[in-house]
Image (cartoon, grey):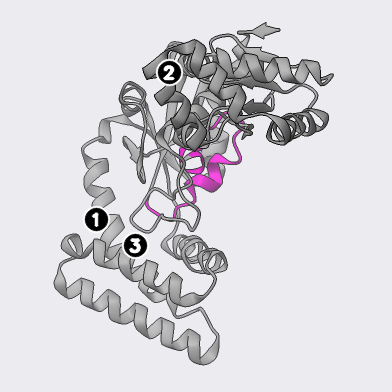
Amino acid sequence: MLSSDFKSVVLNSTPLIDVRAPIEFEKGSFPHAVNIPLIDDKQRNEIGICYKKYGNKEAVKLGHKLVSGDLKDERIKAWSDFIKQNSDAKLFCFRGGQRSKISQEWLRQAGDDITRFKGGYKAFRNYLIDATEDSVNHFKPVIIGGYTGSGKTILLKKLKNSIDLEGLANHRGSSFGKKTTPQPSQINFENDMAYDLIQKLDKGFKYLVFEDEGNRVGSVFIPKYFADYLSKAPLIILQTPIEQRVEITFDEYVIEAQKMYDNTELWKEEILGAIHRIQRRLGNQKHNELCETFENACVEQMQSGSLEAHKEWIETLLSEYYDPMYDYQIKKRSEQVEFSGSSEEILEYLSNRV
């Protein structure tokens, strides 16, 4: 059985079996896909060499030789076990050719029927790229801006028609935004974004809300045409008192961040590294003062167990680094500002936009 109904796969968050080699999977795959390869990286390389020297027939013959006996049984069992847990699963390889066809046939012989993608990974990937490009014709964007620590991500999570690009990128979108788990590959980020867009638009939303990100989030880039489209959107500025911004940033950069690290020394190294990365923008004097305030807070934490002293360097970071930078950026886009207010006021303002 073949299928190219990719939209239903997205809307149903269908579980997928990616039978490509691990090296291919690591470069990028799809949400809800598990890598249970037909051939591993070494076998793929051997078969590739054989293909170049002797052609497809001999390469297929070698593939069957390399994956036979107990190894073949292991492959089939792993696929079958996944299908038992996910009866609606689909199967794919790179172009929907030999690997997925062989895997599908082995499963059928073992008593398990599964549908494979027509055109494989390449066809589904192209569908997601095309859907993302076309999406800009079907919604109007609204951008939530505001100073660092204003709670923009918190606000986004209260909106059903929002897309959290920072969440998809596994990054907080700043010099201090790195997390302990790695960011997705560029391909995975784009595929995740496409899924979110397709699912939101299928619900009939005419407006989609995003955080003010620019054209990249950490190491991943928002596709240029999409970033350009968002850059022209109306801006809604979230206004949050500095005291509350310090608390939000403190919770994110200190409390939650320390929980993610095995020990506070690793967290300390990460924060110091981030401070050093912004030295040029801060200037030497402010940089040294910020480092000293941070070191003093770490000493206080070690001696008393209290985290409260960290709020001092956070307030300095916000007022001396982030705020001037954002003031400069927003000044250039002042004509795009449509509304400013608190979280509650913005939610009320947006309530008529769906």
Q: 47 or 131, which is in the foreground?
A: 47
Is residue 158 on the magenta stretch? yes
Q: Is residue 172 above or below residue 281?
A: above
Residue at point 47%, 25% (across, down) = 47
Q: 181 or 63, which is in the foreground?
A: 63
- The residue wearing badge 2 is 51
Q: Earlier in the sequence, mark 1 or mark 3?
A: 3
x then y, percent, for residue 230: 36, 27
- The residue wearing badge 3 is 318
Total numbered labels placed on residues in the image: 3
Secondary structure at badge 1 equals helix
Question: Which portion, as a residue range, is magenta?
Answer: 147-168
Q: 183 or 281, which is in the foreground?
A: 183
- The reply to whether discs 2 and 1 touch (Cβ–Cβ < 8 Å) is no
- Mark 1 to mark 3 CA distance (whole Å): 9 Å
Secondary structure at badge 2 equals helix
Secondary structure at badge 3 equals helix
Residue at point 75%, 20% (across, down) = 107
- Mark 2 to mark 1 CA distance (whole Å): 59 Å
Q: Amino acid at mark 2?
A: Tyr
- The residue wearing badge 1 is 324
Q: Amino acid at mark 1?
A: Pro
Q: Earlier in the sequence, mark 2 or mark 1?
A: 2
- Mark 3 to mark 2 CA distance (whole Å): 58 Å
